[in-house]
Amino acid sequence: MPEKTLRVLIVDDEPLARQRLEDLLAKEEGVAIVGMAGDGDAAVEAIRTLAPDLLFLDIHMPGRSGIEVLETIGADAMPATIFTTAYDRFALKAFDLAAVDYLVKPFDDERFAQALRRARKSIELEEVARTTKHLLELLHARESGEPAASAAPPKTAYVDRLSVESRGQIRVVPVARIDYITASGPYAELHIGERTFATREKMQTLEEKLDPAVFFRIHRSAIVRLDRIDTLLHAAGGDYAVRLKDGTELSVSRTRREELEAKLGVT
């Protein structure tokens, strides 16, 4: 049975880098380049419009970076991705969970072929998993006498990683590790245990990117992971606050108090 044609999108701000990938892909069977983009904004539009199977994505680009492209689209909605970058292997460990593979420039033909094989395998496994899940749903529906569900409604894709600045470098922080977020001038600070990381994202943007079933904005300057809240505090004068499991206390806006209590099941 012939392999499914792999639809590929190339994103890199360097024309020569795009040409290099195009030349290498031209030698591969069952590959179709559906588009190329030279910056992050164009990449977001192309991903949403073209829905490629595989994305070659440069990390460092002017304007929106490759990591910011991933955050904008959402990890769950991203195609299989191979990062291309000039960063060294050590610096890229943080990206391992966000990509099928990565190519450190300059890379040779053999390393490219290895990354492409890995991407093909990953895409095939995902398709097998989706087919198996659909088959199980059909079998369950037949046994129970219930009509099989049609395509599920699209799930809103919230980010599961955020890029932060640390000692002049950009690294990726898993959202699942964040305890709370506070505003700090032009930055927002992500608090993870005893560590704090700065990001240039605005609080409003972060609120929209995070799953509201997990995080809640208790104040214009604070977003909290709900399962980190230990106690609701009622202070004198009608002010409110929360105490987290690590002892941190954060103010709660009066306009947010009732919604917070509802989310926590407080009556």
Image (spheres, grey):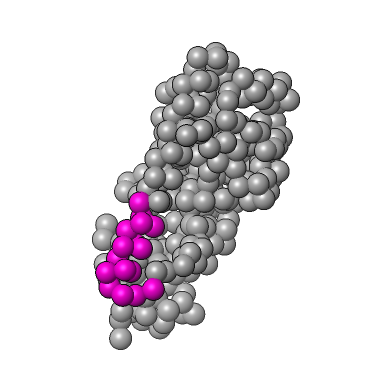
**Res. 53 visible in picture:** yes
Of 96 and 245, which appears nearest the observer? Answer: 96
Chain part drawn in magenta: 132-147
Residue at figure coordinates x 70%, y 43% from the top left: 42
Tell me: 139 left or right of 107: left
Of 182 and 72, which appears nearest the observer? Answer: 72
Compared to residue 169, the image places residue 144 above or below, namely below
Q: On the rendered image, what quadrant is the C terminus found in?
A: bottom left
Residue 262 screen position, x and y as percent: 37, 80
Residue at figure coordinates x 29%, y 66% from the top left: 140
Query: Magenta region's main secondary structure?
Result: helix
Residue at figure coordinates x 53%, y 43% from the top left: 79
Of 206 and 166, which appears nearest the observer? Answer: 206
Compared to residue 96, the image places residue 232 above or below, namely below
Q: Which quarter of the picture shows residue 30?
A: top right
Residue at figure coordinates x 55%, y 41% from the top left: 53
Tell me: 13 left or right of 77: right
Residue 38 screen position, x and y as percent: 71, 35
| Residue 140 colored in magenta in the image | yes
Compared to residue 147, the image places residue 55 above or below, namely above
Q: How many marks?
A: 0
**Res. 11 visible in picture:** no
Compared to residue 162, the image places residue 106 above or below, namely above
Residue 99 screen position, x and y as percent: 47, 36
| Residue 34 colored in magenta in the image | no
Please, which residue is most extreme toward the front here? Answer: 1
Residue 39 screen position, x and y as percent: 69, 38
